[in-house]
Amino acid sequence: MSEQRLDWTPWPEDFARRYREAGYWQGQTLFSMLAAQAEQQPEKLALVAGKQRLNYRELKLYAERLAAGLYARGLRPGQRAVVQLPNCAEFFIVAFALFRLGMLPVFALPAHRRAEVSYFCQHTDAAVYICADQHAGFDYRTLAAELLPLAPSLQQVIVAGNAGDHTPLNSLYLMDQPLPAEPDANGLAFFQLSGGSTGVPKLIPRTHDDYLYSFAASAEICGLSRDSVYLCVLPAGHNFPMSSPGSFGVFHAGGTVVLASGPSVDESFALIEAEAVTIAALVPPLVPLWLDAAAKQPGKLASLRLLQVGGAKFGPELAARVEPALGCKLQQVFGMAEGLVNYTRLDDGPERVLHTQGRPISADDEVRIVDDEDQPVAPGEVGHLLTRGPYTIRGYWRAADHNQRAFTADGFYRTGDLVSMNADGYLTVEGRAKDQINRGGEKISAEEVENHLLAHPLVRDVAIVAMSDPYLGERSCAFIIPREQQAIRLPQVAAFLRERGLAAYKIPDRLELVDTLPQTSVGKVSKKTLRQMLEQKLAAQPTQRS
Ligand code: OOB
């Protein structure tokens, strides 16, 4: 099929027509969404980031001027830009500049390092890398210098802040310069990153139409309006804080986005109080910290109406403490950067809010729950979650082989999640079939880390599994068969992976040296047995968990 030769898989024409006719896909680009707000309420505060406060007119103007500057430097629609910025005003200025120009950002996480970022640059033939000078003790200019020889497509490096040898972002704001026509809303807007369960991270191509629908509909579900003030605590480029409804949903509703520079509870509480924040989104490990802090500082959260929790399993015991302790409504969010997002609704009672992860955004989100042979399970039973719909991708970028496995022949995405659905259509996440560790919402592909470790001269074989953790939900443990008995220790493993440029959150939390790896009946490593071995060992020595 000709589609297979494309870099990405568009929705089949009959589906696309249906989604347009239903009004989901409106033909509006992400930049024109911002421009519409700038037109309607130019002076309204759009963004608070540290000392910077931008209204909609300014945010749009800066994005337009930066788009002109990028264009003047020879960057063109359709080219890819790897963007690695922390939560700062430039994150959004750069994003909307690229959307205006029709360039395609890849939003790398601030925690990513040489291994991930060089791969994003290579795999997308990126023309430019846009980064911060430094953040959280890491110098991105040094990383940029390492990238240039690794990614021949990179023409330039643009740095927000002190640029050193590179191009300062500040020098690129050009007034009254020509710009090409706006891109087609039906085409690609940018890439999300997949949590992944394979050797290399996968890139998720999102269109203006599909993404805009996902956050506009989310904003409605979450009751956003011009009065909404959203605290962005998580990394701004992740799908949850970006679009569920996230900052983009808030821009669509004409509200205000307040950026926290990191997950510190003190900073978050101070911002909530100072800016009268009404909605915030967290991953589960942050919730106990908020509950403790709220008990010590009553009154700080008076403006907060809704706390969203998602990204990893959120247990009912902890969930039950949220509303009484924080004085706001709780919403569970179960989503994925590939598309499908589920929410408990604002008028749902405790049974749904505490015990389920919600139901899909759209009446046209198709959900199938199937057994290992792709046959539907009985109602209420646990099975593999498959989905397709108006904002769920039909294929990863440049990954034809993997797409054969990750999608069914009729276009359903195999999420790798094990879920059950109740009679009302609400989903509960029951487990995971994919080879991934969910470390407090940060996703680690076991295979990716295993491949790196196999390159270590002292490692004969390795398997990485999740171990349960009271704080993060899960951490990772590497079972290693060493080439020389007892010759390798966790600090060496960590140093080796750091040296290879892997993000720190992917470094195993624990190491077990073994003589053999247990096998399944078909000769694959039995990760289930490894997890059981580990749980038994941890139960026997509960204090030695590290
Ligand atoms: C969100 O997106 P990703 O792409 O980082 O991770 C998706 C995966 C899901 O397939 C599932 O395994 C897990 O993260 N997950 C949850 C969950 N929310 C996500 N597992 C259990 N309970 C939940 N509430 O994590 C994401 C994207 C948009 C909105 C929210 C989360």
Image (cartoon, rainbow, N blue to C red):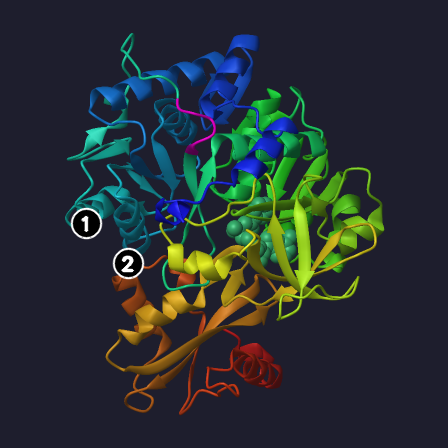
Question: Mark 2 touching mark 1, by CB under 8 A?
Answer: yes
The local secondary structure at tag 1 comes to: helix
- Where is residue 306 drawn, in percent x and y? 71, 37
**Residue projecting furthest to the front:** 1
Residue at 59 percent of width and 27 percent of height = 250
Q: How many marks?
A: 2
* 156 with respect to 263 (left or right): left
In the displayed structure, does residue 253 sit left or right of residue 378?
Answer: left
- Confirm whether residue 10 shows in the render: yes
* Foreground residue among 201 and 160: 201
Q: What range of the chain is rendered magenta?
A: 183-188
Which label sits on residue 104? Answer: none
- Residue 476 in the image, given as x and y percentages of width and height: 48, 69
Crowd class of label 2 (few under 14; some 14 to 19; many from 20; radius 10 Å): some
Which label sits on residue 501?
2
Q: Is residue 466 above or below residue 271?
A: below
Kindly identify the residue that appears in the image at 36 percent across and 34 percent down.
Answer: 104
Q: Amino acid at mark 1?
A: Glu
Residue 347 at x, y = what percent? 82, 38
Q: Residues within 10 Å of mark 1 (few under 14, many from 20)?
A: few
The image's mark for residue 146 is 1
* Residue 273 appears anywhere in the view: no
Q: Is residue 517 magenta?
A: no
